[in-house]
Image: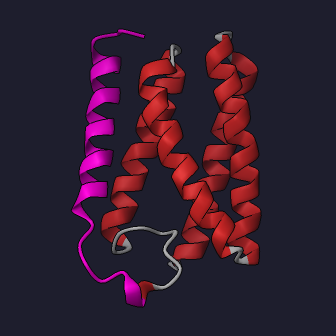
């Protein structure tokens, strides 16, 4: 499967789940972050389709930032589960598609980027810890 099609499909699925959560949760901080995520996801879908490379790079940074702050700010169990699902999909796609789906020029991206993999693995561990310990 072409990485762009995979990326669009994943963003659309997560967009749907994000909007379902946005409607059904009561926690204000979670709602505000999810609302922001919805806007970013919509821009991301358009950026992938239109191949707006700079916007895609910026969105990838926002994506990582939201996942990091979500570990500390998300209170709702379902929001934490969605974030965990997103991190798992991110890690799987990084291994299947040779690291980052957002990278535009693969020629300049030959080296292993283990620091990013490690970051996402740590984020996954924190989300799993939060869910298991029910500390949400």
Image coords of residue 109 (percent x, y)? 36, 81
Q: Quadrant of the C terminus?
A: top left
Residue 115: in magenta span: yes
Image coords of residue 51 (percent x, y)? 70, 77
Q: Quadrant of residue 9?
A: bottom right
Is residue 79 in sight in this rendering?
yes
Toward the bottom, the furthest residue is 107
Image coords of residue 19 (percent x, y)? 72, 34
Seen at 36% across and 9% down, the residue is 135
Q: Quadrant of residue 23?
A: top right
Q: Is residue 12 left or right of residue 94?
A: right
Q: Nearer the viewer, residue 67 or 93?
A: 67
Examine the rendered structure and indicate whether residue 45 appears above or below residue 89. Answer: below
Image coords of residue 84 (percent x, y)? 41, 35
Examine the rendered structure and indicate whether residue 84 appears above or below residue 107. Answer: above
Is residue 21 in sight in this rendering?
no
Q: Nearer the viewer, residue 5 or 65?
A: 65
Seen at 57% across and 48% down, the residue is 62
Seen at 39% across and 86% down, the residue is 108
Q: How many marks?
A: 0
- Magenta part mainly helix, strand or loop? helix
Q: Quadrant of residue 10?
A: bottom right
Seen at 40% across and 90% down, the residue is 107
| Figure colour scheme | secondary structure
Residue 24: in magenta span: no
Q: Is residue 32 left or right of residue 122?
A: right
**Start-end of magenta stretch:** 107-136
């Amino acid at each position: 499967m072409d990485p762009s099609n995979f990326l669009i499909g994943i963003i659309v699925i997560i967009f749907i789940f994000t909007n379902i959560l946005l409607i059904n949760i009561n926690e204000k901080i979670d709602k505000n972050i999810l609302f922001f995520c919805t806007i970013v996801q919509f821009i991301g879908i358009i950026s992938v389709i239109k191949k707006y490379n700079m916007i895609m790079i910026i969105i990838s940074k926002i994506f990582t930032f939201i996942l990091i702050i979500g570990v500390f700010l998300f209170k709702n169990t379902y929001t934490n589960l969605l974030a965990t699902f997103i991190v798992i999909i991110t890690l799987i796609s990084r291994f299947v598609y040779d690291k980052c789906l957002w990278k535009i020029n693969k020629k300049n991206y030959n080296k292993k980027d283990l620091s990013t993999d490690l970051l996402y693995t740590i984020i996954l561990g924190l989300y799993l810890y939060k869910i298991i310990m029910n500390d949400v």
